[in-house]
Image: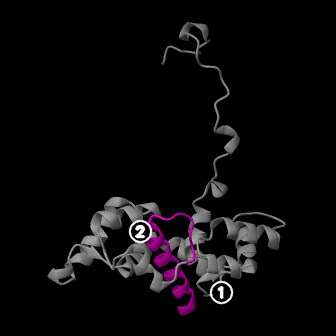
Amino acid sequence: LEDRQKMRDKWLRDAFAVGLSSTSESEQVNHNEYQTLSGKNSIDEEEAVRLLGDYGISGDKAKLRLQEIQTRKPDDVRGLFSPEDLVDVFKKLSTRPEIYHLLVRYSRNQDFLSTEDFTLFLEAEQGMSKVTHEKCLEIIQKFEPSTEARLLGHLGIDGFTNYLLSSECDIFNENNRSICHEMDHPLSHYFIATSHNT
């Protein structure tokens, strides 16, 4: 469990380092490089909210959580946030309890789903049939943000949340998204069913 949390913390520190450095798509940043890339040990509230927003955290919720952290800090560092502060805020605001409980239930009390666990989840909860190992790996590659977890074939809480909130899990039929009726004629050109009650 602790190793998995370290993997998640490393991914988050790397992600925030990349966001601060304004480089794109570089996922391999170690903890020592964080300070080199960002050029500083801490950032202000506006930049922290922007970075958290890049990872799907609501600005208002992030500000509120950052203000709570500020109240516990000494006066000389108020208004500045460390990478650990950002990791803490992200984990507290992005981890949904109902999704975490689903993950723990299917992962045999681990903090990630293996491909076998994920297969069981897809068949039991999602009603999918004939789910292959390759299909699970494909989903993990698409939704798991941690490079290390992807290489191990694990789906952590962030990847699991990304998957469940994606359009692949929508109940809405994608075929109905586009409107196929031509609706650019005057209203009098259309037959409208009415009654005395309308």
Please name the residue shown 45% across and 86% down the image: 32
Which x, y percent locates residue 89? 38, 74
Q: What predominant SS class does the magenta segment belong to?
A: helix
Residue receiving disc 2: 20
Say what amino acid the circle numbered 2 marks.
Leu
Front in this rendered view, residue 164 or 143: 143
- Could you say whether the residue bearing mark 2 is in a helix, strand or loop? helix
- Could you say whether the residue bearing mark 1 is in a helix, strand or loop? loop
Which x, y percent locates residue 71? 20, 78
Please name the residue shown 84% across and 66% down the image: 130
Q: Which of the two discs, 2 and 1, sits closer to the camera?
A: 2
Q: Is residue 135 left or right of residue 43?
A: right
| Colour scheme shown | one colour
Please name the residue shown 61% across and 87% down the image: 110
Q: Is residue 63 left or right of residue 91?
A: left
Residue receiving disc 1: 108
What residue span does the magenta drawing correspond to?
A: 1-28
Do the CB atoms of the residues marked 2 and 1 lie less than 8 Å apart? no
